[in-house]
Amino acid sequence: MPRILPLIILALFFLPACAPKLPPEGVKPPAAEELWSEFRNSSGAVPEMHSFRIEMSINFSGPKRRDRILAEVWGNRNYPVRMDLKAGMGRIFSMWREDSQNWQAFYPGENTVYIHEDGQRGAEVLGFPTPFNLLETSRFLSGYYALLTPGKYTRTQKKYPGFKYFFSPDNAIRSLTLDHQGIPVRIAGMDWAAELKDYDREKGMAMRIDMQLPGKKRAVIRIKEAEFREKYWEDKQLQLRIPPDAETRYLLDSEEIGSNRPGLKETFMFGKRKTVSICGLSGDVPRIGASDLRHSNRGGRP
């Protein structure tokens, strides 16, 4: 069963880039600070957006496998966010939901829901190497790059006809390259990079993202459809419908479940069982103490 986060969902890899577009003859390229201000002011072309929906295809390749999956991400600007991952003839094999409290991933084929307090770490434990949680992934896909990058850079490097901006190593994003119009063309972290291509000025977003991830993995994301709305999604449209008899597993950062199934490692820390409500549906799930959940301390997170 394929397992990949669109960025990663946040769930991406780089291929040789096309030659950069140059400014018109006789026009002086802007200075680094001027270009940075243009980027900060224009990132995300739909500032009145309250909700979104994005459909995409993801072609993933690694040393041992190649996969192609379809993904749909939708939600409100500041939570909740949903994502469905599809394989084959549109069959959904995984459904994710993230809000301000936690991240959940339900696998119908296993009738199991996995829960983690941090969406980036939860996805990573399940074998999805991604630099972002689901909300950050949605912003990345939607072109809201300024919401993901620090407000100040530490230094710059000329990358004709634009500039490369560097940030503190404590941030998930460590560098950003802008062309002469202030449009992002490359974003990189400690062990990943994303080439932003086919930029749609009307939507303010890249329609293709080529990514390079750890372990010699690559992914090409192609945006098929992007919709931005002033109206919020209703709560019922963002619910993760989990059968009452589904098994619930709370993930620890120390786990390494990955995508080699069957045979999940039985090293979860479970307590006594009790009935609780998850996303409006009640069921018998394991209870786990707060001390059993290890918090992620990723730099650069708001």
Image (spheres, rainbow, N blue to C red):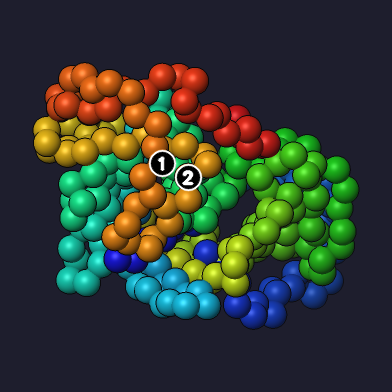
- Residue visible at 37% across and 74% down in the picture: 67
Residue type, mark 1 in image: Thr
- Residue 7 or residue 1, whichever sits in front: 1
Spot occupied by residue 281 in the image (x, y as percentages of width and height): 15, 27
Rounded to the nearest angstrom, the CA distance separating label 2 from label 1 is 8 Å
- For the C terminus, which image quadrant? top right
Answer with left or right where residue 33 lies relative to residue 205.
right
Q: Mark 2: few, some, or many residues within 10 Å (few <14, many ≥20)?
A: some
Q: Where residue 173 is drawn, which disc sits there? A: none
50 vs 288: above or below: below
User: Label 1: which residue?
Assistant: 267
Residue type, mark 2 in image: Glu
**Pointer 2 and pointer 1: residues touching (CB < 8 Å)?**
yes
- Residue visible at 86% across and 53% down in the picture: 156
Answer with left or right where residue 260 lies relative to residue 64.
left
Query: Mark 1 falls on what kind of element?
Result: loop
User: Label 2: which residue?
Assistant: 255
75 vs 185: above or below: above
Q: Is residue 213 visible?
A: yes
Answer with left or right where residue 241 lies relative to residue 135.
left
Query: Mark 2 falls on what kind of element?
Result: loop
- Residue 221 or residue 130, whichever sits in front: 130
Q: Is residue 137 visible?
A: no
- Residue 248 or residue 83, whichever sits in front: 248
Rendering quarter of residue 90:
bottom left
Answer with left or right where residue 179 lies relative to residue 295.
right
- Residue visible at 47% across and 78% down in the picture: 64
- Residue 127 or residue 130, whichever sits in front: 127
- Residue visible at 22% across and 72% down in the picture: 88
Q: Residue furthest left?
A: 244
